[in-house]
Each structure stands twice: as structure tokens, then as C-alpha cells.
Image (spheres, helix red, strand yellow):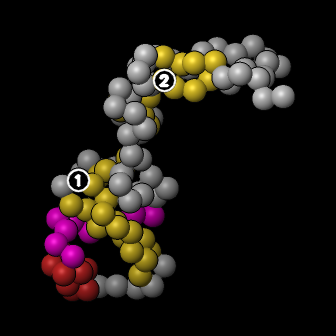
Amino acid sequence: MLNYAFIKNNIVQNIIVFDNTTTETLTVFKEHFFVDEIILANNEKAVIGGTYDGTKFWLPQPYPSWIKNEELNEWEAPVPYPTIEEGSDENYTWDENTTSWLLLPPSN
């Protein structure tokens, strides 16, 4: 089975699974669903709401301030995640209002 992403304006609109398909079938689906492209998408980053930049799939942007790391094909915070000492149970969460990592209270 093959997964195909239905793309409109570079946004993944849907993922459809075909047992086997032809170019003609994909053309019919493309016209019927009014999408720009149908791309083979056997990739964990091909998700509804994600994007396709013409060469690769991207998960949805987690926060407006995060930027694409083209080398890793991942979104990154504008501030690196804090360094945590080995054995520490510290956890942080991203705060978009301050564009910084906030220490979460311990989970006892």
C-alpha cells in the first residue's frame, strides 16, 4: 500500500492510501478534489496540515517563532533547549509569549 498526499497551496490537505494506482487514477482524484499535486508520501512528516516545499514534507510549524532547519528537516525554537545535567528531572516547555523555555514544576 502506498500513501499519497493531496497538496493545495503547499499544504497537505489529505492523505489517501492506495493498494495500487495509476497515473490516470491520480489525475482523476486531483481534478475531483481540486488539489495542485498528489505526491507519494511514505514519510512520517507527511501529515494533514503539514507542508510540502517541492522537495520534502514538513510537520506543521509548532509555534510562529520557530524556524526551519533545512539540514535536519525540522522546526527549531529560536532559543536552544536548556542544557540539563545528567540525572536531573528538569523539564521545560516553550512559551511563545516570551519566546523562551520555561521550567516546569516537578511532577511529584
Instruction: Name the quadrant of the C terminus.
Output: top right
Query: As shown in the figure, which amino acid type bears the numbered disc 1?
Result: Asn
**Which x, y percent locates residue 29?**
24, 81
* Apparent side of residue 94 relative to residue 98 in the rendered image (left or right): right
**Which x, y percent locates residue 53?**
26, 47
Return the residue nearer the eye: 76 or 105.
Answer: 105
Near mark 2 (Cα within 10 A), the count class, few <14, some 14-19 or many ≥20, is few
**Which x, y percent locates residue 59?**
41, 47
Number of on-image labels: 2
Residue occupying image coordinates x 23% and y 53%: 10
Query: As shown in the figure, which amino acid type bears the numbered disc 2?
Result: Asp
Instruction: Give residue 6's quadrant in the image.
Output: bottom left
Please state the extent of the stretch shown in magenta in the rendering.
33-42
Q: Main secondary structure of the magenta part?
A: loop
Identify residue for label 2.
95
Identify residue for label 1.
10
Instruction: Name the secondary structure under disc 1.
Output: loop
